Amino acid sequence: MTLRFSKLGCSKGGRRLFRDIDCEVPAGRWLYVKGPNGVGKTSLLRMVCGLSSLDQGDIAWHGASIRGLPETYRRDIRFLGHLNALQDAMTVAENLRFGCALHGVALEQEACRAVLARFGLRGREQQIARHLSQGQRRRVALARLTLSPGRLWILDEPYVAMDDAGIGLLADMIANHLDGGGTAVITSHQQVAIPGHPPLLLELGA
């Protein structure tokens, strides 16, 4: 499936952030959105996710406009922003089950244990989310992302609070998603390298 921007533009507070962006991201590829603070990177991602209205131009997924967020688009998209969107009063396992249930997936106990082990969280199933470190919270959010099926990943600064091991784990996770025919749009102030997958580059404010 292909993500396409056509003459996309955005203004905030009477100031134009970007205009006339034309871009196409096919299945198996990822778009690296770069640029200094204040040029509209997060605003662009919010438009792709349907969290902000389209000021100018259009965004299409598999040839159809995302205006109105059709069911097929809502089913395919997954967003990870600066915040991890965990329920602080829930355990780690409950957060994963809740995230899966939102997308119609039942998470079995063994699958839960396996994904937590993969993300360096073995034995933390019953730990309350508010007691996790920022790095651990990020790993729970990433584990939830891998468990919920979705063809289009929108990742806004995904390496926040990640150590070197976590960064490598996330890069491999994205590579696996792309190998399976998925698509991703990523912003990051850190250098992003996805093994075997050179990016398509969109530099705002250039």
Image: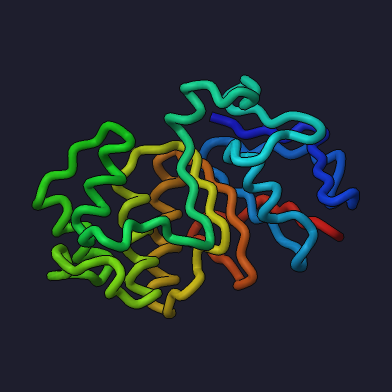
Left or right: residue 159 compared with residue 44? left
Q: Residue furthest left?
A: 110
Residue 136, by quadrant, is: bottom left
Residue 124: x and y in percent read 17, 69
Q: Is residue 53 above or below residue 198?
A: above
Residue 101: x and y in percent read 26, 38
> Which quadrant would the C terminus be assigned to in this image?
bottom right
Residue 48, by quadrant, is: top right
Left or right: residue 21 compared with residue 24? right
Left or right: residue 45 compared with residue 120? right
Left or right: residue 88 compared with residue 50? left
Q: Is residue 175 above or below residue 73?
A: below
Residue at the image point whose x is 39% and y is 74% from the top: 134
Q: How is the image coloured?
A: rainbow
Residue at the image point whose x is 89% and y is 52% from the top: 15
Residue at the image point whose x is 13% and y is 70% from the top: 123
Looking at the rendered structure, the number of numbered marks drawn on it comes to 0
Residue at the image point whose x is 82% and y is 40% from the top: 9
